[in-house]
Image (spheres, rainbow, N blue to C red):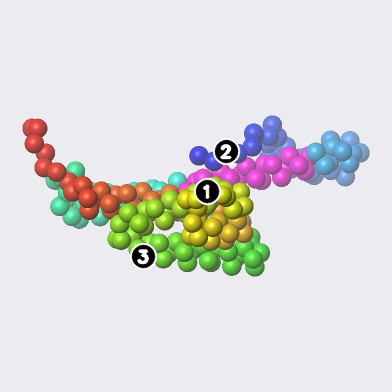
């Protein structure tokens, strides 16, 4: 889970109260020094709020994915959910609709440069998704992209860092901080999906024998 700054000991009500009397000589923000400190505190509160909203947005997406995957399993023969049938599908649909009642959307302001970088990154990831069924090579490329997300943006001297890594890295460093967070989340989710596909291909479900 992403970390956020320590919360301020200043409530929203207190913020409104101070702002309403900011022009008064008795206001705690009357002096330039106090005013600067006060607005820095407000800025920190806003950053914390946005960070928490991003985490909630991630949680909602993860719940949607879990519900969709479970629903898919319910509609195919699967020993892990045998006997649940239509009743389970109904429950999952109800939970999905309930989750959709919560409308979470964190809007990210981007420069033209950041918009173009995000477009290029999404195009590369979409191409990676289209190659999911090609096996281990796709998993390795996903690992390459994930490694690129955690580097400072300068080329390394590692021999394992190939053209794909440098190319992806040179693009993602131009993305906004919020988009970098979402891209990392998307790539980790894609890697988990690739792992599950490879397990299905190379390690098919075995019959339960020790009963």
Residue at mark 1? 158
Q: Give the left or right position of residue 9, taking residue 75 as reference.
A: right
Q: Nearer the viewer, residue 88 or 52?
A: 52
Instruction: Name which residue lies at 37% across and 53% down.
Output: 139
Q: Earlier in the sequence, mark 2 or mark 1?
A: 2
Which mark lies nearer to you, 1 or 3?
1
Contact between labelled residues 1 and 2, with CB atoms less than 8 Å apart: no
Residue at mark 3? 130
Mark 3: secondary structure: helix
Q: Nearer the viewer, residue 165 or 88?
A: 165
Mark 2: secondary structure: loop
Q: Is residue 192 visible?
A: yes
Answer whether residue 131 is magenta in the image. Answer: no
Q: CA distance from mark 2 to mark 1?
A: 30 Å
Q: Is residue 112 above or below residue 191?
A: below
Residue at mark 2? 3
Q: Give the left or right position of residue 77, taking residue 69 as reference.
A: left
């Amino acid at each position: 889970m992403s970390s956020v700054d320590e919360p301020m000991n200043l409530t929203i009500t207190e913020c409104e109260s101070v702002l309403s009397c900011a022009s008064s000589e008795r206001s705690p923000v009357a002096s330039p020094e106090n005013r600067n400190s006060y607005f820095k505190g407000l800025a920190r509160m806003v950053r914390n709020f946005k960070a928490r909203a991003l985490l909630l947005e991630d949680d909602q997406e993860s719940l949607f994915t879990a519900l969709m995957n479970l629903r898919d399993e319910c509609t195919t023969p699967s020993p892990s959910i045998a006997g649940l049938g239509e009743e389970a599908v109904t429950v999952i649909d109800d939970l999905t609709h309930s989750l959709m009642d919560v409308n979470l959307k964190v809007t990210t302001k981007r420069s033209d440069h950041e918009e173009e970088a995000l477009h290029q990154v999404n195009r590369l990831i979409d191409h990676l998704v289209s190659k999911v069924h090609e096996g281990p090579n796709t998993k390795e490329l996903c690992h390459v992209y994930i490694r690129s997300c955690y580097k400072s943006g300068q080329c390394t001297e590692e021999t394992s860092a190939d053209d794909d890594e440098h190319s992806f890295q040179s693009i993602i460093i131009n993305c906004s901080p919020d988009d970098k967070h979402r891209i990392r989340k998307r790539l980790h989710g894609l890697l988990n999906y690739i792992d599950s596909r490879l397990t299905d291909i190379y390690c098919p479900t075995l019959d339960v024998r020790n009963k």
